[in-house]
Image: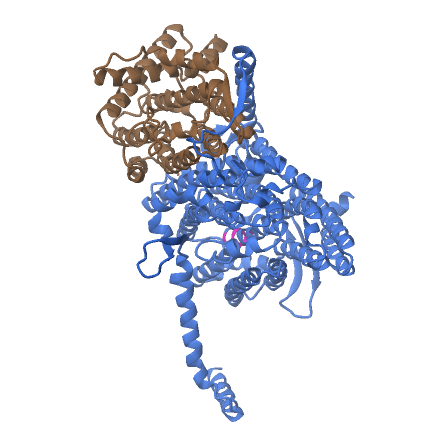
Amino acid sequence: MVNLLTTESGFFLLLLLYSLGAIGSLFFRKKDELANGWQSFFAIIGSLWGIFFSISAFFTGNLSFVAYSSVFPLLSFSFHIDQLSAFFIFVISLITLFCSLYGIGYIKHYYKKYSISALGFFYHLFIIGMLMVVTASNGLFFLIAWEIMSIASYFLVVYDHNDVNNTKAGFLYLVMTHVGTAFIILAFLLMYKFTNSFDFESIQAQAVAIPVFIKNTIFILALIGFGTKAGIIPFHIWLPVAHPAAPSHVSALMSGVMIKTGIYMMIRLFLDILQPIPLWWGITILIIGSLSALLGVLYALTEHDIKKLLAYHSIENIGIILLGFGSALVFISLGNTLLALFGLGAALFHTLNHATFKSLLFLSAGSVINQTHTRNMEAYGGLIKYMPQTAFFFLVGSMAISALPPFNGFFSEWLTFQTLLQGMTSVNILVKSTFVLATGALAITGGLALACFVKAFGATFLARPRSTEVAHAKESSLSQLIGMGALALCCLLFGIFSGYLGSLFINIGTHLTVFRNISLPPILSSKINFIAPNNFGSVSALALIVFLILALFIVVLLVKFVINRNQKTKIGATWDCGTNLTPRMEITATGFARSIILIFAGILRPSIQNEIEYRDSKIRYFPKSRTVTLRTRDIYRLYFYLPLNKFITTLSVRAKAIQSGSINMYVFYILIAVAIALFLS
Amino acid sequence: MMIFIWILQLICVPALSPLCMGIIKKIKAKLQNRVGASIFQPYKDIWKLLHKDEVISTDASWVFRFAPFIIFATTIVIGASIPLFASFLKNTLTGDLLVVVYTLALGTFFLALAGMDTGSAFGGFGSSREMTISALAEGGLILALFTTALSIGTTNLFVISNAGMLLSTQFFLSTILAFIGFFIVLLAETGRFPFDNPATHLELTMIHEAMILEYSGKRLALMEWAAANKFFIFAALGANLFFPYGIAHSVDTQAIVIGIIILLIKIFILCAIVGIIESTMAKFRFFRLPDLLITSLILSALAIGLIQMQIL
């Protein structure tokens, strides 16, 4: 058992379990229940095994093996599992476990409508792809794994294919992810040209041989390539359409885990393989992180589609992760490896935390959508009375994502803030001002995220129902509640044990080559307090929770049972100013965010469209109906992607001139090409 | 002795906060040529409300019922996490600046949810306005507090106030700038002029009052008391972080008595400033408020820029 845990066979068992789930579910094409049972069983067993395997791999250290050397000299199916990979396997397995639990009950509403066995096949394939992405140590093999992950997730996005919006979203996702892959391939080819290898370790050994200019080019290519998958602005446009289209437990996996594979590869490349790196890489990532965080939350505020809102929050959180990671890169370039470790620790901690609370939010949103049959938040309202447990879990997720203590989101944001604070002490004016900007962006992002989740929770669960669908809503099934409840518990537990987890994650970095030679100060190992770099600050999660609960307990006790024992509580109607209260008088999600949108009108570019239909079209005196459409313009599509599209189309039209269609002409082209090739060689 | 001091620290905020409200109201009354109620009137109001029956809306869920307790409890926790009269109580567990900021945000979160819960148009718009202002204020607040943290080299509030070197020539300008930024946030977060009129129930302008409109009885008492606590917390932060004079540095009865008296004097000066501002200027239009908050952010960012120190 112990041997199995730490060897390559342990990892193959993991892949085997998921493969069984994938292939097995194909055999139950007509039997929906069996297909559901089969795939859930293997996903749960596989993810449980994955959790055990990753924890033991995390503590035992490096594991490197070649599974199969192919006939192609450059392609070998080789794996390398260090602590960083083990961490990501852990995150993937943890989220898969709860999403699969949730899936048992959730998938039921697809029975008879769509093929459950196809869902099972692609679901497992998707997880296998992610697992191989974070463990591959050969560039070509990595690209194969990356493609498996992308293609499988494409089929999951278009799973609900009767809705034409979903197939459109899937197409956009397919295009964007392949544009990203193209950039990644370019980056790998450039690295191959100067190191003669696709193997990550030999690239790392020869990274110094890469000229500075090429290295910078690789950075930009990889940043665009992996940034597209991670969803950084402005390469994010696929994310808010593709994530909502997938089934909710898959959206949870995509938002919680898949986009993190982009982060994983950035860490692998920039912090591990391509070291040493120039200062401006870190600065660039900090700026991109600030922009993604701030713009992500602003766009989230404009949304009233609940899943789109959550998808935009993924962009925001990727930004926050990049703030930690970017500061790690800056500190490395400045030669302060200890602080860099803290930055990396903050990024990894937030990766885990975002995975838990974002999948929790997607799952609870999925339950709500399942009951109300709409993603439009304006049609919800008052759901807390119909789905109390789901509401509670969504509340926990909202508090965690808004970085409210005592949940986990607060502690990773705390560490990110502390890391940024260290950067502000720099004497380099460029570094200092970048860090001040990043801190300001993070602070405002925190405030806006809070506003956004007051809006999301309030409009969805509080006040009175705004549509008849809500009144028919029932609480989610048991398996769904277990999945959500376990994630909510994780949000609290990761908060309570933040000191311990934080020091573990800070330790992950010490196994990367750049950090090999530094020893951590013993102060980090404190399990009660969560301590910041340079002893700058500390916080105890446990004490904070105990304080809060104690204070709450005393206040309730004093007010309810000591001071106020004999008073009566009457149930009455909300003050209605003498008219009948209708759901139309409640604030809507759009109305709630309108003032913030107007304040940031310069960035969000809101538009108002008034349409009035008249009873008498001639004198236009008596309007029959009025419509007001509030929109925000998609400036990326308008000013970046559409012109790009136009440019490529024009170029293609021009290129058509040489495609005459006659074979003779093409043979002549080949002749010219051969001549040029000969001449050049 | 230490236990006694801790108890004193714990009850300090809830015990003294209504007095602040009373003093501000008295100052405003005097400036309007009225006699005004006694400065102890807020205590009597809270006591009276605590003993009244209450009405709860049929639409309200547990969020509405539970929010006052949560909000009040957060102010108590923060009261124990900030330096009040003694800086030697080094609370390394929760005495961190970010803990205070985000625990305050926890209270704001539930306040805004409670406003939306009854489904009245007033509550909803109150919440929307409150969240707009507090979202924009957060940047200025964190950067202003970070200015002091960077000057001293720690984010622990007790250590910052213990160092007491902020107004030295080295940090003079940045402290003053950050304090102005902080003061703007204080006015915004505690719902004073020019952000909110605490005395109005006019639906066009009210923010805080709109959110707690549906509350009555003991829950209203807790809400009002928690709002007073929040004001006291902000005033104490301003007094002890930016002007850390007179705070007790050692376990010594005389030092502590002096500490309490000086804290009261500093807070009363801040109350007087707030009272005078409320009597002499008009409330701003809602869409002019962001300008003020962005000013606060920029001032604090400037303050950080002015700090010269070297750790890296």
Q: Which residues are magenta?
A: A264-270
Q: Residue at x 45, y 85 (%)?
A: A658
Q: Position of residue A64 (x, y in %)?
A: 66, 53
Q: Percent position (x, y) of residue A394?
A: 57, 39
Q: Quadrant of residue A470?
A: top right
Q: Indicate the quadrant where residue A60 lies.
A: top right
Q: Is residue A206 above or below residue A357?
A: below
Q: Is B204 left, or right, of A395 in this rendering? A: left
Q: In this orientation, which residue lies closer to the viewer: B164 or B64?
A: B64
Frontmost residue, B294 versus A280: B294
Considering the whole magenta stretch, tell me its main secondary structure.
Answer: helix
Q: Is residue A269 magenta?
A: yes
In the rendered view, tell whether residue B307 sits above or below residue A118.
above
Write down the colour of chain A.
Answer: blue
Chain identity for the colour brown used in the image: B
Residue B255 is situated, as x and y percent measured from the top left of the image, at 36, 9
Q: Nearer the viewer, residue A7 or A644?
A: A644
Q: Viewed as shown, does residue A242 lie left or right of A104?
A: left
Would you place residue A572 above or below residue A83 in this image? above
* Colour pattern: by chain
